[in-house]
Image (cartoon, helix red, strand yellow):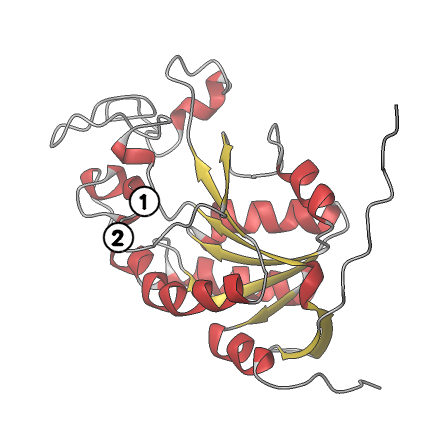
Amino acid sequence: MFADITRPPIQPQPVTLSTETKTLRMDLAKAAMVVIDMQNDFCHPDGWLAHIGVDVTPAREPIEALQKLLPVLRDRGVPVIWLNWANRLDLLNISAGLRHVYNPTGDGVGLGDHLPKNQAQVLIKGSWAAAVVDELKKEPRDIFVDKYRMSGFWDTPLDSILKNLGKTTLFFAGVNADQCVLCTLQDGNFLGYDCILVKDCSATTSPEYCWQATLYNVKQCFGFVTDSEDILTALNQPATEGK
């Protein structure tokens, strides 16, 4: 019996990407796009956050930029990973403390409860509530990973998937930027990934100071900030040597 474990090398695709702090020379062949929580519960007017009185208009703003960027990334061989909050029906995958999320008093609609308007169960795997919004097209080659808390690296196969794909640079997009996106990006940084927040493909329903703090902390501590137009520009021109 013979087993081939050589793991053939990936052909490099060097590109030069402008960010808000530095110009990066990166290998597109080692990059992946991680789209976090662009789900009905967070982004749809009939979803969970809207039901509890949150204005989800900001959470919908990344949709247009993602509609333009994702097909181009796919065409260049960059995998799109949909990282969605999708709990077990019995909620045995989350701790008691997590059940207070967005329901601090316990009197409102919380994780696993039925939304009054359409009876969808909040953030339950397979429910309308946990599904990616219809405006964002999913492809069969895309990768879907369920998460159960703010960070998408905890108690999920995300790290193993990225390692098996040979990916070391991660683009981050989605909502909420100061919560699940930032927590996942931070953990990615701690695990040794090079992390890039795509600004116009991310948003938050939190106050403006939370958004500004997120941008500050990513640029100061955890990685880089760019936007979809800079990525598209980088993909359309050859890389240049940095100093």
- Quarter of the figure with residue 110: top left
In the rendered view, tell whether residue 194 sits above or below residue 139.
below
Residue found 39% across the figure and 12% down from its top: 90
Rendered-image quadrant of the C terminus: bottom right
How many labels sit on residues?
Answer: 2
**Residue 174 location in percent, x, y?**
44, 54
Q: Nearer the viewer, residue 153 or 169?
A: 169
- Quarter of the figure with residue 155: top right
Residue found 40% across the figure and 31% down from its top: 101
Residue found 37% across the figure and 53% down from its top: 206
Marks 1 and 2, how far apart at CA: 7 Å
Mark 1 or 2 closer to N-term? 1
Amino acid on which disc 2 is placed: Val
Q: Secondary structure at mark 2?
A: loop
Circle 2 crowding by C-alpha within 10 Å: few under 14, some 14–19, many from 20: many
Q: Nearer the viewer, residue 84 or 151?
A: 84
Q: Are marks 1 and 2 in contact (CB under 8 Å)?
A: yes
Circle 1 crowding by C-alpha within 10 Å: few under 14, some 14–19, many from 20: many
The residue carrying mark 2 is: 56
Q: Secondary structure at mark 1?
A: helix
Amino acid on which disc 1 is placed: Phe
Residue at the outermost left position: 117
- Quarter of the figure with residue 202: bottom left
In the rendered view, tell whether residue 131 sits above or below residue 133.
above
The residue carrying mark 1 is: 42
Residue found 34% across the figure and 44% down from its top: 132
In the rendered view, tell whether residue 90 sits above or below residue 134.
above
**Residue 38 location in percent, x, y?**
37, 49
